[in-house]
Image (cartoon, grey):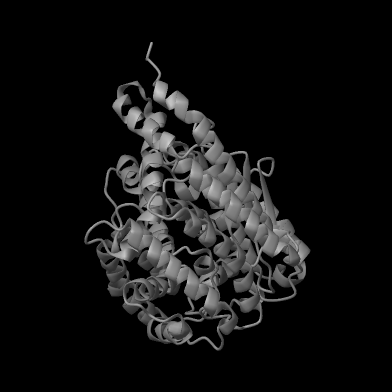
Amino acid sequence: MKKVSNAYEELKPFLERAQAFSTARILFEWDNETLAPRAAEPNTTKVVGTLSGEYFSVITDEKVKELVRRCRQEKESLGEVESAVVRELAEEIERLECIPPEEYREFAELTAGSTGIWARAKENNDFESFAPVLKKIVEYSRKFASYRAKEGQRLYDVMLSDYEKGFDIETLDRFFGTLKERLVPFLKKLTESGVEIDDSFLTGDYKEEDQEAVGRFFAEYVGFDFDRGVMAVSAHPFTTNLHNKDVRITTSYNNRVDDSLFSVIHESGHGIYEMGIPDELTQTLVGQGASMGMHESQSRFFENIIGRNEAFWIPVYDRLQKQFPGELGDVSAEQFVKAINKVQPSLIRTQADELTYSLHVMIRYEIEKMLIEEGLKVEKLPEIWADKYEEYLGVRPRNVSEGVLQDIHWSQGSFGYFPSYALGSAFGAQLYYFMKGKMDFEGLLKKGDIKTIREFLRENIHRYGKLETSRQILKRVTGEDFDPGYYTDYLTEKYGKLYGIKAE
């Protein structure tokens, strides 16, 4: 019988306490974004600040540091999960202990309140009201990264490592360089092909209650369990979780039906990942997705590789028509699938077609590098943003709400997150090609058998939580390291077929 580490047993109460503070903070943040009245915001930010401070105190407690050292000495008596928890805790200690406690709490309060300021600024098309708080967030983020940076390490690399280990500026520059080299000329060829796709019927009098009904149907259809999850409305769709039996997704509604529909399927992908975390991992430091890139691989896999696949709609398109007989009753499944895959350079990332999506991400990546590495002034952001959209996508925002204010991430201090979206899309494509060699992927979709596909993902990815990194998962599942060629092949093959053109 294997001896249990005494140090790890002593560590458990500290881990449980830290987890409780973290869970409470997440719950308040969720409430702030969804149901809480606007007047509650100042008081809620104080609560979030207090909870963050308590979490910080537990993680950086000298007793905890000592127990981590002892656990490492007793590593032979640790199981796989315990070893991974100790590893993650050691990294969390290293991330936090160099930050003064009062600054950590101030930043938590700042970002708790800034999301509301951002939402109102977006609603009122008013960048000037958000700029001062964004400037503070950038300053804090750079300062915290400077505390953590090892000798010679760039500040933005520190931030990137929080979301995707093993992907630094040098690696991402090569990745986005590959996308730019292959996708930009392909996009130009496609837009100049003269092929017209009608998507006018996607915009209309789509009542919110009907959109909610089909959203719930498709969330359940792909595997989101409403006994363990809920769906609400927020300014920017997102997913959060308290544990594997309490996963929360949001969406938003407008007069374009595919926006809310695919945001629900996207967030369901995130939620299914979290629901697939096993009980022995949930509510521990390894009880969540491997990385934000791997998380985005799952959400975008469900949204695009499954949800925008023609085969997906064969068994369920009539459900959509029944909900919207006036808008879609005379629209064939073939017309609908072409419309939801129409390529059209646009301004809004969350509404972007699958082909141009990663160009939206590339713009944000380049701007974040300028903010963090080159000292770009916050006041210059609207102009820089508009210039880059014009350069890469040939469109220019008419206002800041459809420009620099469209995303919530910077108000949360999430610098380094955006590349995860493009990496996730690329991870998903690599998994898709591998899975097609193991199963009749499109055949399963035609039969309405999402379960076989979902179970493959759960068995090979979800159940591992953070026991492995994204690259380790890809290597174990596909037998190959990360290869962005699968992503560019996927996009050029799919859209070449749709538009009847060949990639170079």
Return the x and y of residue 504 as percentages of the image width and height.
27, 73
Number of numbered callouts drawn: 0
* Residue 468 in the image: above or below residue 111: above
* Most foreground residue, 346 or 464: 464
* Most foreground residue, 477 or 343: 477
Judge whether residue 320 can be spotted in this image.
no
The quadrant holding residue 279 is top right
The quadrant holding residue 499 is bottom left
**Image quarter of the N terminus:** top left
Return the x and y of residue 87 as percentages of the image width and height.
36, 38
* Most foreground residue, 185 or 133: 133
Residue at 56% from the left image edge and 82% from the top image edge:
127
Return the x and y of residue 229 as percentages of the image width and height.
66, 45
Residue at 40% from the left image edge and 83% from the top image edge:
388
Residue farthest along the top direction in this orientation: 1
User: Left or right: where does residue 15 sit relative to residue 39?
Assistant: left
* Residue 247 in the image: above or below residue 102: above
* Residue 216 in the image: above or below residue 341: above
Return the x and y of residue 429 as percentages of the image width and height.
39, 56
* Most foreground residue, 481 or 444: 481
Judge whether residue 74 can be spotted in this image.
yes
